[in-house]
Amino acid sequence: MTQPVRKPHALIVEDDALVRALLEAFLREKGLRITSVGSAAEMDAVLAREGIDVLLLDLGLPDEDGIVVARRFRAAFRVPMMIITAREGRQDRLAALEVGADDYLTKPFDPQEMALRVGNLVARANGSTGQATNASIRLGAFRLEPRLHALFDEAGAQVPLTPAEYSLLSAFANAPSRVLSRNQLLDALARHGDAPGERVVDVVVGRLRKKLRDDSRNPTLIKTVTGFGYMLQPNQE
């Protein structure tokens, strides 16, 4: 029996109900499954219970600044992110792109153009296969499985990770060969109760290096970039 085709899942985070309805209508017409919410807190609740394929994020949210939300999202997920906002300033656009937005669209926008851009983002991220963007990630001799929220060694045994360790490792895996500042990494740790501060990042990085058998005196997997933060250099055997 033929399996039904999986529809890409779009999460819309927009506090204006009319704009939200417009986005929903045009994206459903393009064959996407839609979840829409009006705040950052509601977004977090959706992400905690299910995966998505693309995020459409408004910057003017009622409970948290959109740039902060975008940075926090990008620290935890590789999923494509489109900013849709009334902010037209160059600095806002640059800030959104700097924290990892894949596209930026200002209101008012052409709904058909928006839908085409979203479709292109999903297709590029999924290799035009329609599959979710949470495939296995090689980390030296280890394998990170985003679907299972788990790390496995070369023998297939699961490596125990705390929630903070998993979130930081996931943030690194989502940005291979890219320097992540301590602020970006703190965003990935923020929901796990660790006391805020740069020292927390250093401690969790140290624990991860030990579990990944990455020599802290001469690390080849999680490298220190002096004055900036850390960078994952994957596939080092």
Image (tube, rainbow, N blue to C red):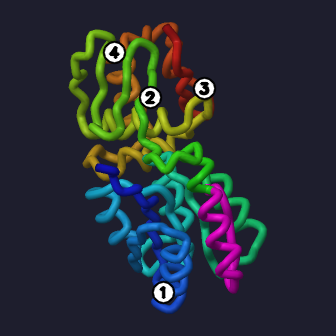
Residue at mark 1 to residue at mark 4: CA–CA distance = 49 Å
Name the amino acid type tagged 2: Ile
Q: Residue at x 64, y 61 (%)?
A: 96
- In the image, 232 versus 135, the foreground residue is 135
Per the image, the residue denoted by label 1 is 21
User: Which segment did they paint magenta?
Assistant: 101-120
- Give percent across and percent down for residue 228: 61, 34
Specify whether residue 195 is painted magenta.
Answer: no
Tag nearer the camera, 2 or 3: 2
Q: Which residue is mark 4?
A: 210
- Disc 4 residue type (three-letter): Lys
Place of residue 75 in the rendered image (x, y in percent of width and height, measured from the top left): 48, 47
**Residue 205: image location, x then y, percent:** 40, 27
Please determine whether, in this image, residue 216 is positioned above or below residue 229. Answer: above
Q: Residue at x 40, y 12 (%)?
A: 141
Q: Helix, strand or loop at disc 4? A: helix
Residue type at the position of mark 3: Val
Residue at x 53% of width, y 68% of height: 56
Give the spatial CA distance, label 3 vs label 4. 18 Å
- N-terminal of the pair, mark 2 or mark 3, is 2
Q: Residue at x 75, y 74 (%)?
A: 89
Q: Is residue 100 left or right of residue 147?
A: right
Point out the tag, 1 or 4, that comes first from the N-terminus: 1
- Distance from Cα at disc 1 to Cα at disc 3: 44 Å
Disc number at residue 137? 2
Q: CA distance from mark 1 to mark 2?
A: 36 Å
Question: Which of the two discs, 2 and 4, sits closer to the camera?
Answer: 2
